[in-house]
Amino acid sequence: MSRTLTIKNVFGIVILSVFSALMVGTIIASVGIVYLPENDNNVTNFLALFIGQGFMVIPLLLFLIARKESFIDRLRIRNLSLPVILSTLVLSLGIIILVDEFDRIASLLFTPPEHLDQLGYMLKFDSFNMAVFLMFGIVVLAPLGEEILFRGFLQKFLEEHWQDVTRAVLVTSLFFAIIHLNPFWLIQIYMLGVILGFLAWRTGSIWAGFILHAANNLVALLFTNYNQVLDDIYTWQGHVAPWILLIGGGCIYVGFNWLNKTIKVDS
């Protein structure tokens, strides 16, 4: 290994990676607006998101290649046992339900910005091909890139550097929330980031956090496209139905205890 990493190096790489994603996405969107017909704007926006997300990890990977470091060790890419995967899925279901209710309460207290409606329009399934691309981009590519960058690289370094897991998780989660550039969702994203950080630390792998992150994005995407059908089952007077909340609380209790027991057995 070459010279020792510093906090300045690590945050610099993370900022460069995020900036690269934003720049590439902005360039593609701008070119599309100028040169493509107006009715192709949805395709352009998706390509900007899709390719931009892919570029998010490029600076980081090039940095690690230059240092001849192992991706697996440095980025916490460790396989999970089947019981850990299943317990994480159960836990994720409960967390998604409770975070969704928190988001609904926040919407009553604060008026959502108009650009959220535009974002919802961008995520509509206009065709089968668009649905497939959105599923891959939003449910797979975006969570994978963010988990590699934040929980795999940044948080892992801070844990080792500070020897304080709590501080590392909280700081990483704050940075994770800020780079989403969405003040309305800042608290929700921060809460999710803390849970993702806990999962990465507890399991020693980015894959547990990826499961939650991907599941959260999948549910959001499905509700964006099928809310009229799902709301009849899922909601009650604009909130998550009480019986769904009970299921969510039960999933968190069962999933958390199952995960801890499974990790102890694996250890």
Image (cartoon, helix red, strand yellow):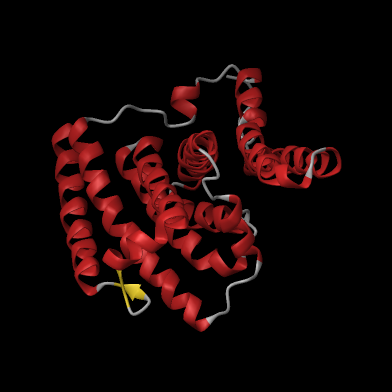
In depth, the one of 70 and 18 nearer the eye is 18
Residue 60 at x, y = what percent?
62, 31
Residue furthest to the bottom? 109
Does 107 sit above or below residue 19?
A: below
Does 51 sit above or below residue 123?
A: above
- In screen coordinates, is 255 left or right of 95? left
- In screen coordinates, is 201 left or right of 180? left
Quarter of the image where the C terminus is located: top left
Residue at the image point whose x is 42% and y is 77% from the top: 105
Residue 230 at x, y = what percent?
33, 60
Residue at the image point whose x is 61% and y is 51% from the top: 122
Q: Is residue 267 visible?
A: no
In depth, the one of 17 and 161 nearer the eye is 17
Residue at the image point whose x is 66% and y is 64% from the top: 115
Q: Which quarter of the figure has residue 118?
A: bottom right
Residue furthest to the top? 68
Quarter of the image where the N terminus is located: top right
In depth, the one of 179 and 4 nearer the eye is 179
Q: Is residue 41 visible?
A: yes
- In screen coordinates, is 24 left or right of 190? right
Residue 165 at x, y = what percent?
41, 50
- Say how many tags the image has: 0
Residue 238 at x, y = what percent?
38, 77
